[in-house]
Amino acid sequence: MAAEKVAIVIPAYNESTAIKEVIAKLKKALKLAQINYQVIVVDDGSKDDTAKLAQAAGAHVISHILNTGSGGATATGLSYAQQNGFTIAATMDGDGQHAAEDVIKGVELVEKCRCDLLIGSRLIENSGMSKVKVLGNRGLSFVTYLLFGINVTDSQSGMRIFSKDALDRLKWKTSGYEFCSEMLWRAKQQGLRIKEYPIKAIYTDYSISKGQSNWNALNIIKYLLQRRIMELFGE
């Protein structure tokens, strides 16, 4: 694994409360695992000290002047990884919801499982996740299956591991949270291999307050339907 060059991409919007601790825990775990890494924080137009704190914690920071959305920030970070010769990339949330150990597990697993896009699923073992969150995520995963024919348990997970092939070929058009499902669709179109592995979700009052509501799922479904219809009719 030491020969691999791994980018850890963290899209972040107003995460000054958690970002420093997230990076510190991540760096400690990656060092113990002897992984050759770089932490890349994409500050998506934050109005607080996210960028300053991330840089002080040792991350490479890319700043958006305006807020583009989770999909846009993720695309920026992965594009940087692709252009700078990283062979594996991982994405994770900046609110402390994801465990550093699960990032390492995914990075080590992506080659062993011979896949290109490895999704960290909170729903394979969903202890600690509220019933409302479980219902919302399963609903969006079902919509992802209906629209695109992709069967995964946690289509909205922010923890994803990308092979070099995925970094080179995977692109999407939406910039909000709907990009999570669109990414799976584009991966399928590109013939990339998609798999899942179980991760735990760390829920605090802060991470719960930062999460998207189930009502936003309606907007996600609307955008996905629009995108699907447009492409069906050749736009």
Image (tube, rainbow, N blue to C red):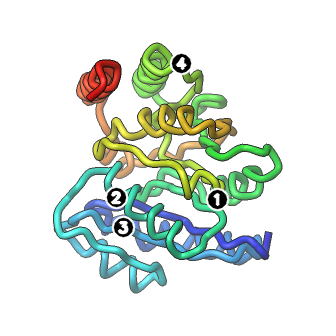
In front: 166, or 100? 166
Is residue 127 depicted above or below 205 in this figure? Answer: above
Q: Mark 2 points at which residue?
A: 73
Q: Mark 4 points at which residue?
A: 149
Of tags 4 and 2, which is closer to the observer? 4
C-alpha span from label 4 to label 2: 26 Å
Q: Distance between the residues labelled 4 and 1?
A: 24 Å
Contact between marks 4 and 2 (CB within 8 A): the answer is: no
For label 4, the SS is loop
- Amino acid carrying label 1: it is Lys
Q: Quadrant of the C terminus?
A: top left
Q: Which of marks 2 and 1 is nearer the N terminus?
A: 2
Choose top left, top right, bottom left or bottom right for residue 232: top left
C-alpha span from label 3 to label 4 = 31 Å
Q: Is mark 3 on a helix, strand or loop?
A: strand
Vertical placement of 128 versus 228: above or below?
A: below
| Mark found first going from the N terminus, 3 or 4 | 3
Q: Quadrant location of the N terminus?
A: bottom right
Are discs 3 and 4 less than 8 Å apart at CB? no
Amino acid at pointer 3: Val
What percent of the width, then of the height, locates residue 203?
A: 47, 45
First of labels 1, 3 by sequence position: 3
Q: What residue type is labelled 2?
A: Ala
* Gap between marks 3 and 2 measured at Cα: 6 Å
Horizontal side of residue 215 vs 38, given as left or right: left
